[in-house]
Image (tube, rainbow, N blue to C red):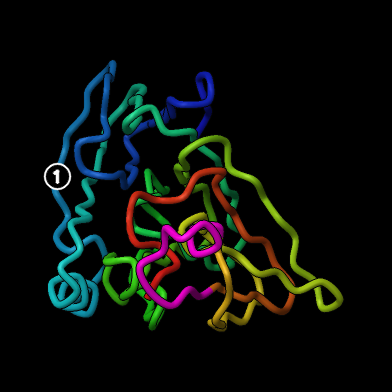
């Protein structure tokens, strides 16, 4: 059972079951817990190989036991996402925890991932259960529909779910507008039906500049 204590701490109540979480994110626990590092951050050989190729630093641990375990990371805001057999795509740096029964892996994201220095793959979480994602400031959930496609600055993108198509387009960001950009700006366009999670702060990377 996932529940928030405040907006920056995740409490997970376990009864001999397990949870996957970002390595090093445990801040406290009661009861009996066992911790095990999971290689690669994804399941199977593909997850391990793609993480190694892209040089991503995300590592995941499995926590199993009986009691309550609390997770947090750099005072980031936490959002709970309920999955009903669908798939959640989340930037690796924004992943905090997921039910152990959910399948985690990697997905190719193309230009966007490479331009941010986060590798060419993003984390996927799929199945039935709960996941917890982090954001720099409270996450905003935006609905995408056939009538209303959405364009997002890649530095503010956190995650998305639903039947969405991603494309990349050149555009102007606030950084290029004020002369702070270092190259050609681009944006992410979402079309279809689903939800996009964005944060009210851009990552401290080259973000939308290619």
Q: Which residues are magenta?
A: 174-186
Q: Is residue 1 visible?
A: no
Q: Tell me the residue that label 1 is attached to.
A: 36
**Is 175 covered by the magenta stretch?**
yes
Q: Is residue 57 left or right of residue 143?
A: left
The number of callouts visible is 1
Above or below — where is 72 with respect to 161? above
Measured as percent of width and height from the top left, residue 99 is found at 42, 48
Q: Residue at x 57, y 48 (%)?
A: 81
Instruction: Report helix, strand or loop for mark 1.
Output: strand
Q: Nearer the viewer, residue 140 or 50?
A: 140
Q: Residue at x 40, y 51 (%)?
A: 203
Residue 58 visible in the shown view: yes
Q: Nearer the viewer, residue 106 or 129?
A: 106
Whether residue 89 appears in magenta in the rendering, the answer is no
Q: Based on the displayed image, in which of its 4 quarters is residue 196 positioned?
A: bottom right
């Amino acid at each position: 059972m996932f529940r928030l204590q405040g907006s920056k701490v995740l409490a997970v109540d376990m009864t001999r079951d397990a949870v996957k979480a970002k390595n090093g994110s445990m801040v406290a626990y009661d009861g009996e817990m066992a911790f095990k590092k999971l290689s690669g951050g994804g399941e199977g050989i593909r997850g391990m190989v793609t993480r190694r190729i892209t040089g991503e630093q995300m590592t995941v641990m499995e926590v199993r036991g009986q009691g309550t375990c609390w997770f947090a990371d750099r005072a980031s805001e936490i959002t709970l996402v309920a999955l009903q057999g669908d798939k959640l795509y989340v930037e690796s740096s924004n992943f905090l925890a997921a039910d152990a029964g959910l399948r985690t892996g990697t997905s190719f994201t193309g230009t966007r991932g490479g331009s941010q220095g986060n590798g060419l793959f993003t984390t996927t979480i799929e199945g039935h259960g709960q996941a917890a994602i982090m954001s720099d400031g409270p996450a905003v959930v935006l609905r995408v529909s056939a009538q209303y496609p959405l364009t997002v600055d890649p530095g503010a993108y956190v995650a998305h779910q639903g039947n969405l198509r991603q494309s990349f387009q050149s555009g102007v960001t606030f950084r290029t507008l004020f002369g702070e950009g270092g190259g050609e700006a681009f944006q992410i366009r979402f079309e279809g039906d689903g939800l996009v999670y964005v944060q009210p702060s851009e990552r401290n990377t080259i973000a939308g500049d290619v």
